[in-house]
Amino acid sequence: MSFVERTFIYVGLVLALCLAVAASNLGTKAHASAPAASADSVGVVNVVALAQQLLETEAYSEVRNARAGELTTQLEGLNGQLQQIAQRLQLTGQNDPNFQQSVNEYRQLQSQLQQASAEGRVEMEMLGSKQLVETYRIIRQASIDVAKREHVGVVFASHMEAPDDKDRSLNDAEHEIFARPVLGGEAVRDLTDLVRTELGLPEPTPEAAGGADATGADAPASDAPAQPK
């Protein structure tokens, strides 16, 4: 259903977002699993991939699917009524006294169906936007927590790898480029895996990792972490 699929066009909403971690809060002991970095180092987190993975957890997908099902049932009901009137018109001659009344009913119901469809698309897009903002807040807080432990001074929302060579539109190419405000450097650390662990999300499969910009994780977690206060 098109109004459901359009919900997930969110790459552009999370481009070039960055987090500043106060130096006074960087005194927490680092985890033994990773070496401590200097407080003036820079970290990056692939917010797009993590947001997609969070949005596929049951906490979010079940809400979307339930509402999409309700809207679909409503639209199917209106469409069924519309088809009944259309069949009636095919069996009714234009000289029939009820013909014009049926035509008016058809046009009115058709207008209702179009309006309900448009309102459904807007509602699903708003729901997707609300969920995306919520997942960003969760990822942001997890990134700050990881940065404190790892003694990373500043964290950017950025991909570390360069865009691949596949064909894409100019608009998509701009998104791919500007999703990478951090180009690299000796003191840049990719914190994505640490943040994913902080969120309790599973490691993506190689197939999902290769197409993270489009599909997210292949094996979503059973639930999403609680939203930070």
Image: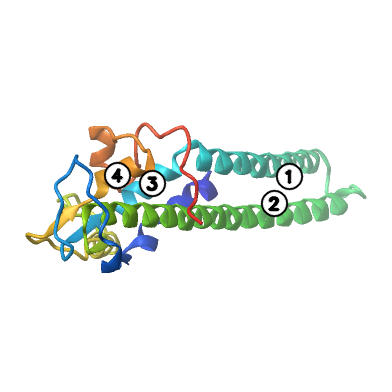
Q: In this view, does 104 lie above or below 203?
A: below
Whether label 3 touches label 1, CB < 8 Å: no
Residue 1 picture location, percent across and down: 53, 43
State how far apart marks 2 and 1 are (Cα): 6 Å
Marked residue nearer the N-terminal end (2 or 1): 1
Whether label 4 touches label 2, CB < 8 Å: no
Q: Is residue 22 left or right of residue 89?
A: left
**Residue marked by disc 2:** 113
State how far apart marks 3 and 2 are (Cα): 31 Å
Whether label 4 touches label 3, CB < 8 Å: yes
**Residue marked by disc 1:** 78
Q: Is residue 117 above or below residue 24?
A: above
How many residues crowd around disc 2 within 10 Å: few (fewer than 14), some, or many (20 or more)? some
Marked residue nearer the N-terminal end (1 or 4): 1
Q: Front-most of 184 and 93? A: 184
Amino acid on which the number 3 mark rests in the picture: Gln
Residue in view at x 16 percent, y 54 percent: 189
Amino acid on which the number 2 mark rests in the picture: Leu
Of the numbered discs in the image, which one, if any, rests on residue 212?
4
How many residues crowd around disc 3 within 10 Å: few (fewer than 14), some, or many (20 or more)? many
Residue in view at x 21 percent, y 66 percent: 181
Instruction: Name the front one of labels 4 and 2.
Output: 4
Residue at disc 2, secondary structure: helix
**Residue marked by disc 3:** 52
Residue at disc 1, secondary structure: helix
Whether label 2 touches label 1, CB < 8 Å: yes
Of the numbered discs in the image, which one, if any, rests on residue 95?
none
